[in-house]
Image (spheres, rainbow, N blue to C red):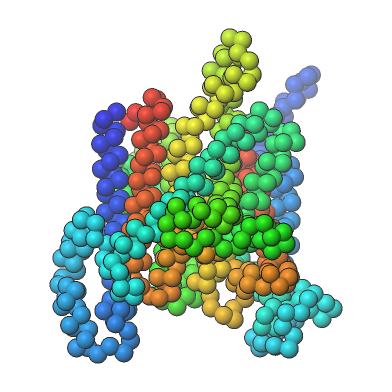
């Protein structure tokens, strides 16, 4: 078990390093070099040289990477010239809101997906099952913003229940003071994430129902409800962890798109504006963050899986 | 077809009372039979065929001007001359729908083919040689998987102006990861099969084993995955187009139609939003139906063997 943990940790570290290398490489692949990208196309060569020397861009690339990595490990993600703030301060102010949005949606999606999946497996091939599959099919086949658009047009334009823009307060606490504006983004992201989970939840619940331990539980005389709650539900939790880990990039992407749609001041929207402003240090920082979050998420998922399922030990 | 393992037809036994002889066909026939029995799958194929016709043959019958803007006619509701109305620039929506479909379908197909090609070979090599080769190759896959496609593409399109070829290249460059993982998994189990060992004993080189035995036997997984890849590519394209990081104006794309149209939602110009939305959902649902049915059909083959 410890061997597995150590091996998995090492893998994660290697992957994170790889992500940093790619992100770093991308920044330095800019045509004309990063100095020109930041200073503008009309900067003179002298200005560029001075900039390079000041910011250490004239040293060999592996040394630059080393310095950058060193900064990274000390929490310094770079400096955004366009916003005149350090990248970590920008991320620090946006991260709590993002965590609220993505975290809430993930949790809600799991909370919805498991019971519905189990119910679908129990009432297999009946009306409920077909309805559920059809709904999740359609949800799954829509681009994430499409669902948002539909919800906006129904709930914010036709029936003016929710606003179409998320609250603009700068702290999570402030945002929670205007819950009406949070509801639509969270619901949309939840439904989109649910769509990702639903197909696997259903098939894993169906597989679990056919297992021997369910037959044993029934043979022992357990009521059907007890069988479902005590055995099926618990065993469905296990694949959910892996599922969540794998779908993290997709959830982040959906988060980005929905932040753009609802004007939700999160890291996704920040990335988008950074791209339109050509703010490369900020884009780099967020990319590294998202990549690391995905790797850590997968790592946690795998480790949780190994803890929950004693059969997994390799 | 010679690459697919073929089960010989059983010869009909003469005059046996009772038992019918079970006639097996080739893998392709078996899969086709199960596939066509699945109603959703047939619906999916019909939808795809209709959409392809609509997008590629439609413009031959329904001429619209997609280059010159026409402000006088902008934001018209659906009418006789513009069957689905016009958008903010006076372009006919139906015509734009067809052109957008062309680019989406072309790009998605190319991406699926290229990504499957690369991914299958990569995964088979990683899975077959195992140990260190596998570990290194799969770490590369993990690294690339950790960065969401959209993030990466936004970055790339910030540096280089997107063109159709760039879209195809970058999307393929990130889509090959999924088939690589899948084929690697299949290879890991396939390489323990007896026929692989037999070929090894007979002196077959690794390359022969991988290309003539392992990959053809994983063809089920490969085809199913390729189908889902098309659906995913269309969705990713829709997102990129919506955000504005795909082909620039005035190229007609479904995502950009949605993006433009959504600014007029509150004005009630529903025809600028819903046609593109329905088109995307329809074609993605169709490919998902087909993919699911293919997956079931290939599983049936495994069961019947």
Q: Residue at x 83, y 77 (%)?
A: B79
User: Residue B86 versus residue A154: which sits nearer the camera?
Assistant: A154
- Residue A107 visible somewhere in the drawing: yes
Q: At which x and y percent is residue A225?
A: 63, 21
Residue sitting at x 70%, y 48%: B41
Q: Position of residue A256 (x, y in %)?
A: 48, 60
Q: Quadrant of the C terminus of chain A?
A: top left
Position of A249 compared to A19: left or right? right
Query: Which residue appears at 31% of the width and 64% of the height?
Result: A87
Instruction: Name the side, left or right, on which B134 lies relative to B297.
Output: left
Residue A106 position in % (x across, y down): 50, 45
- Count of picture labels: 0
Front residue of B103 and B121: B103
- Report which quarter residue A90 is drawn in: bottom left
Q: Nearer the viewer, residue A215 or A81?
A: A81
The residue lying furthest to the right in this view is B80
Residue at the spot x=48%, y=35% of the render?
A: A239
Residue A279 sits above or below residue B114 on the image: below
Measuring from the top left, give residue B73's x and y in whole percent.
Answer: 74, 85
Q: Is residue B165 left or right of residue A278?
A: right
Is the N terminus of chain A in the top left, top right, bottom left or bottom right quadrant? top left
């Amino acid at each position: 078990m410890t061997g597995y943990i150590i091996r998995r940790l090492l893998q994660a570290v290697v992957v994170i390093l790889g992500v940093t290398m790619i992100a770093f490489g991308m920044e330095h692949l800019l045509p004309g070099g990063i100095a020109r990208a930041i200073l503008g196309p009309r900067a003179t060569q002298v200005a560029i040289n001075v900039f390079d020397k000041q910011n250490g861009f004239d040293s060999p690339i592996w040394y630059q990477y080393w310095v950058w990595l060193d900064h990274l490990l000390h929490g310094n993600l770079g400096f955004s010239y366009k916003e005149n703030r350090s990248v970590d301060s920008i991320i620090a102010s946006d991260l709590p809101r993002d965590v609220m949005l993505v975290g809430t949606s993930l949790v809600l999606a799991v909370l919805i997906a498991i019971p519905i999946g189990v119910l679908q497996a129990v009432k297999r091939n009946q009306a409920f099952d077909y309805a559920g599959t059809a709904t999740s099919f359609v949800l799954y086949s829509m681009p994430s913003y499409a669902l948002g658009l539909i919800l906006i047009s129904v709930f914010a334009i036709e029936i003016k229940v929710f606003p179409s823009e998320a609250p603009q307060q700068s702290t999570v606490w402030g945002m929670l003071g205007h819950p009406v504006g949070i509801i639509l983004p969270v619901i949309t992201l939840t439904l989109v994430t649910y769509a990702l989970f639903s197909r696997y939840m259903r098939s894993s619940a169906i597989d679990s129902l056919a297992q021997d331990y369910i037959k044993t539980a029934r043979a022992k005389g357990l009521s059907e409800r007890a069988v479902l709650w005590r055995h099926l539900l618990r065993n469905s939790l296990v694949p959910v962890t892996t599922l969540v880990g794998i779908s993290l990039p997709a959830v982040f992407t959906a988060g980005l798109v929905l932040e753009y749609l609802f004007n939700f001041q999160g890291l996704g929207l920040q990335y988008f504006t950074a791209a339109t402003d050509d703010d490369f240090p900020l884009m780099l920082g967020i990319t590294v963050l998202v990549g690391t979050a995905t790797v850590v998420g997968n790592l946690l998922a795998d480790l949780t899986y190994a803890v929950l399922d004693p059969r997994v030990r390799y | 077809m010679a690459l697919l393992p073929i089960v010989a037809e059983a010869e009909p036994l003469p005059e046996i009372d009772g038992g019918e002889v079970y006639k097996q066909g080739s893998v392709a026939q078996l899969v086709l039979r199960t596939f066509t029995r699945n109603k959703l799958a047939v619906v999916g194929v019909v939808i795809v065929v209709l959409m392809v016709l609509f997008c590629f043959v439609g413009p031959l019958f329904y001429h619209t001007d997609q280059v010159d803007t026409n402000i006088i006619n902008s934001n018209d509701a659906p009418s006789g001359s513009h069957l689905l109305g016009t958008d903010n620039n006076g372009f006919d929506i139906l015509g734009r729908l067809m052109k957008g479909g062309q680019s989406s379908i072309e790009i998605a197909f190319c991406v699926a083919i290229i990504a499957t090609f690369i991914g299958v070979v990569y995964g088979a090599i990683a899975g077959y040689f195992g140990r260190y080769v596998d570990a290194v190759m799969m770490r590369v896959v993990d690294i690339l998987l950790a960065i969401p496609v959209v993030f990466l593409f936004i970055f790339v399109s910030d540096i280089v102006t997107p063109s159709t070829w760039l879209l195809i290249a970058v999307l393929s460059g990130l889509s090959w990861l999924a088939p690589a993982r899948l084929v690697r998994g299949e290879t890991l189990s396939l390489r323990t099969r007896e026929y692989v060992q037999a070929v090894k004993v007979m002196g077959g080189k690794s390359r022969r084993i991988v290309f003539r035995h392992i990959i053809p036997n994983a063809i089920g997984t490969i085809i199913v995955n390729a189908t889902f890849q098309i659906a995913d590519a269309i969705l990713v394209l829709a997102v990129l187009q919506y955000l504005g990081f795909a082909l620039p104006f005035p190229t007609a794309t479904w995502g950009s139609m949605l993006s433009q149209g959504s600014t007029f939602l509150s004005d009630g110009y529903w025809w600028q939003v819903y046609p593109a939305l329905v088109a995307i959902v329809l074609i993605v649902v169709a490919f998902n139906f087909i993919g699911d049915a293919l997956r079931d059909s290939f599983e049936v083959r495994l069961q019947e063997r």
